[in-house]
Amino acid sequence: MARSLKKSGKSYQHGNLREAILKVSLQVIEKKGVQALSMRDLAKMTGVTHQAPYRHFKDKKDLLAALAQEGFEQLYACLEESQKTALTPMERLQNSATSYMTWSYAHPDHFRLIFSQHIPEYETSGSLQKVTDQLLGLILKLVEENQKAGNIRQGDTRPIARHLWATIHGATSLLVDRQFKPLNNLTTPVPQLAKDVVSNLINGLKSNV
């Protein structure tokens, strides 16, 4: 658990400088965008020397990778938590889709960042690769469970998982950017919207046999 920042005059004593920089970075991105991020400015905003941030991040690219990792970890934790109340494979899939949309809608800037072109290739960061593999593994597991339950047609799991993720992610992006407004004026609650998306998707993935 992160320790709080203690303010003294115009400077801060950091219990965890790394986490403080990540938090401030997200605030900058929210207000001004990724391009406005500057290691020097972040040092000023957190009340430390210009070199202090480099103890935790090699450069801006490394900082963005850490922000992406944090976002993926939070998203994965929400999806994993949603599994605990589900009793069937379909409920686990529905709950996961709902959590995916709900977390993203509540953290739009973090959501946009972790899937943006500003993030380095996953292969360049072992820790970032690990957490994205965890997310992919969860999606694959959901597909496999629903195949065994007869909810989804049989076949190679990975193409179906990609289809599933692409559909849910696409709907989530439209939701986050409020592009559903022309259709329903955003009156549909996020959980119901997620359920509708998954239900329509599953109907298309059912076996024809």
Image (cartoon, rainbow, N blue to C red):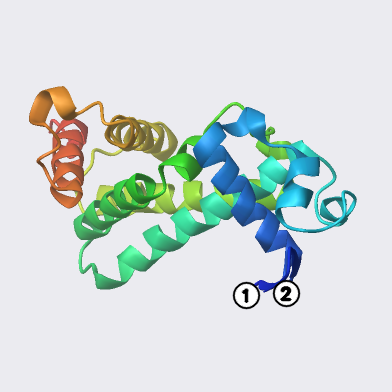
Q: Is residue 114 visible?
A: no
The amino acid marked with disc number 2 is Gly
Reply above or below: 109 against 102: above
Reply above or below: 182 against 67: above
Q: Are marks 1 and 2 in contact (CB under 8 Å)?
A: yes
- Residue sitting at 17 percent across and 36 percent down? 206
Q: Say whether residue 150 is left or right of residue 126.
A: left
- Residue sitting at 20 percent across and 69 percent down? 87
Considering the numbered disc 2 on the image, is that residue within a helix, a strand or a loop?
Answer: loop
Tag of residue 207: none
Q: Pick out the residue farthest to the right.
A: 51
Percent across and percent down for residue 128 are 66, 48
Crowdedness of circle 1 by 10 Å Cα count: few (<14), some, many (20+)? few
For residue 40, which quarter of the picture? top right
Q: Say whether residue 8 is left or right of residue 103.
A: right
From the viewer's side, name the closer residue of 190 and 10: 10
From the viewer's side, name the closer residue of 154 and 4: 4
Mark-to-mark CA distance, 1 and 2: 6 Å
The amino acid marked with disc number 1 is Ser
Considering the numbered disc 1 on the image, is that residue within a helix, a strand or a loop?
Answer: loop
Q: Which residue is mark 2?
A: 15
Q: Pick out the residue farthest to the top.
A: 182
Percent across and percent down for residue 51 are 90, 51
Crowdedness of circle 2 by 10 Å Cα count: few (<14), some, many (20+)? few
Percent across and percent down for residue 85 are 25, 71
The quadrant of the image that shows the N terminus is: bottom right
Percent across and percent down for residue 117 are 59, 26
- Residue sitting at 72 percent across and 57 percent down? 46
Q: Which residue is mark 1?
A: 4
Reply above or below: 91 against 147: below
